[in-house]
Image: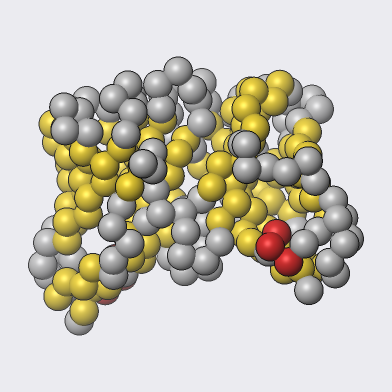
Amino acid sequence: DTGVSQDPRHKITKRGQNVTFRCDPISEHNRLYWYRQTLGQGPEFLTYFQNEAQLEKSRLLSDRFSAERPKGSFSTLEIQRTEQGDSAMYLCASRWTGDTEAFFGQGTRLTVV
Amino acid sequence: QKEVEQNSGPLSVPEGAIASLNCTYSDRGSQSFFWYRQYSGKSPELIMFIYSNGDKEDGRFTAQLNKASQYVSLLIRDSQPSDSATYLCAVTLSGYQKVTFGTGTKLQVIP
């Protein structure tokens, strides 16, 4: 499977715990995006990498959220001290340089109880 | 004003009819426009992209772009029940590489 891969697909955690998600983009794609989507809403931009550089981070993202892409390949998104409002689908997408379409992974559904 | 706006719907059309989905965007410098389809509980999948003014057709789908009016639309001909999904409009804004999405329009095709 050469598509975007996300792990885990589902995560249930208790409020206050830390969680980490992983995204493996399509191998030749240098741009990687993280989005958050809640029910009835479109994907909300969180952050974006070009290779290993994090070029943009949403103002909506609190300091509890951090993302890395250490070698310009896979990326991780960590949420510290989770809150119930963090419950959402976390989507990763990748695309190649230029005005090309972004391809999405299957997402990680986070439930904070 | 939201960067990308869509009517949330639901838009209901009978099977075999034409479904028309609309999207407006706020940044005049926007360069690339995408339509994604999202089934409930699934991730978005690309249907069409368009860069230039005018129409672009792919099978039953036609994307239309009018940069002067800052408007992009998606027409689905011969709508099928399997087309029932949420359709997301996405835009690449000028000077940035992030892809910004609208809230989506839910389409229901009635058999």
Q: Is residue B36 visible?
A: no
Q: Quadrant of the C terminus of chain A?
A: bottom right
Q: How is the image coloured?
A: secondary structure
Whether residue A73 is situated above or below residue B46 in the rendered picture: above
| Rendering quarter of residue A92 | top right
| Rendering quarter of residue A75 | top right
Residue found at x 41% / y 54%: B103
Residue found at x 76% / y 37%: A67
Whether residue B57 is situated above or below residue A82 in the rendered picture: above
User: Foreground residue, A40 or A98?
Assistant: A40
- Could you tell me residue A91's position as x and y percent? 60, 50
- Could you tell me residue B57's position as x and y percent? 17, 41
Give the mark count: 0
Whether residue A112 is situated above or below residue A69 in the rendered picture: below
- Could you tell me residue A110's position as x and y percent? 71, 63
- Residue, far left: B17
- Residue, far right: A17
User: Foreground residue, B110 or A34?
Assistant: A34
Residue found at x 31% / y 52%: B6
- Could you tell me residue B49's position as x and y percent? 31, 37
Q: Quick check: B83 left or right of B71?
A: right
Whether residue A90 is situated above or below residue B99 in the rendered picture: below
- Residue, far bottom: B111
Q: Quick check: B16 left or right of A70?
A: left
Q: Quick check: A55 left or right of B34?
A: right
Q: Is residue A61 visible?
A: yes
- Residue, far front: B1
Residue found at x 22% / y 54%: B21
